[in-house]
Amino acid sequence: MVWSWEGAIPDDARKSVSMDGVRLATLVPVAATFEPAPCGVAGGCAYALSRFAYVRADGGEMVLESPLARARIALHDWRATAIVHLLAGPQRVEDIRARMPSVSEEATRALVALFLAARMASEATAVGRCAADESVALRSWEFHDLLFHARSRGGRHGHPVGGTYRFLGDLDPPPALAPIAATRPVELWRPDLRRLEAADPPFACVQEARRSIRVYDERPLTARQLGEFLYRVGRVADYWEDELPTPRGSVRIASAARPYPTGGGSYELDLYVSVNRCDGLDAGLYRYDAERHSLQSLAAAPEDFDGLLSDASLATRIPRAQLQVLIVIAARFQRVTWKYGSIAYSLILKDVGVLYQTMYLVATAMRLAPCAVGCGNADLFARATGVDYYAETSVGEFLLGSKETEG
């Protein structure tokens, strides 16, 4: 039996295409708002796969998904997957039949209709692109951006969202603080917060004066200034353990709060400091120990250390030789992914934004020169620090230097 579309379907319905008793593909709605797109297949008309559609393995079978769709298509048979491959370029039913004679014309039409109904494909334009992708709004989206947006928000997937404690019972809760290597630390200056409260400029002045500054004073940042900055931005300000109720039972979780807020109190972000020029501190790559307020020296290869600074120079157009301190923000992913489903990486990026703002405000209050960096090389960072790319790696960069003397 070959499937054919007959009007709208219930939200929980599935529609399959079969041939000679073998299921080829099944459309599975993943959102209550799913409605099929028009799916009449006209003779002589060419169709093309959306540039947002992708095939991946899931649960032992291949699936076709798209951030444009509120449904997925399970590809049960290699012939259905082969037709998806052909639709990467414009194809008429007769073209597909010529290249896939093992699939009947009726089944071929039904498969194309299934892809149209799920918004995985549409009629091809004169230049061979999927017509549905050509709206002005969609043309401005890159594939990975739209997929990340749709997958980390509700509405277009059927996965649990939020604090599901997804690995409770499988993995131990990740520690609040990463282990520190047993090397001799570089102790940092600890400022007196009460004095800062009295001496800092008013918050309204700090907020209005906040700017990205890419020109530095001839005299570099000092180790004392760097110590104060890191203390005000990233130190462990409090530590506690809580017994928390979860959908899977209670669990004891440790938290180590910093001076900025994070999603669910995860505090997954750690700071790595690349020192190029800093009075009182040797050049090199360090890991900031937020609990002890000290720096741990890392044995980065010279070419990797230079690569981190060169990338920041290229991204900000600040000459490499003039850079003073680059702070790399790294995320210990499991601190967030252990608890949160669907939204974990989006939470991490929001936390990076909060930390950026905190860095800007502190640097402005200290009359330093701050500048967030728009991009970085996570592979290079992992190689330079020796961390596991999938356990902890870079998600943001921030430059800090001395501000030119006014007047």
Image (tube, rainbow, N blue to C red):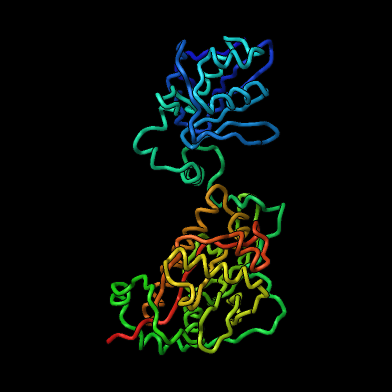
Residue at 54% across / 25% down in the picture?
A: 87
With 389 as the anchor, is 92 left or right in this view?
left
Q: Position of residue 312 (x, y in %)?
A: 49, 67
Left-right relation of 237 to 193: right
Tell me the quarter of the picture where residue 3 sits. Answer: top right
Q: Foreground residue, 101 or 114?
A: 101
Q: Residue at x 54, y 78 (%)?
A: 275
Percent across and percent down for residue 318 are 43, 71
Task: Residue 249: give x, y in percent of width and height.
Answer: 65, 53
Q: Total number of numbered labels?
A: 0
Residue 118 visible in rendering: no
Q: Residue 355: x percent and y percent?
A: 46, 67
Q: Quadrant of residue 175?
A: bottom right
Quarter the C terminus occupies? bottom left
Can you say which quadrant of the picture contains the N terminus?
top right
Q: Is residue 330 above or below residue 209?
A: above
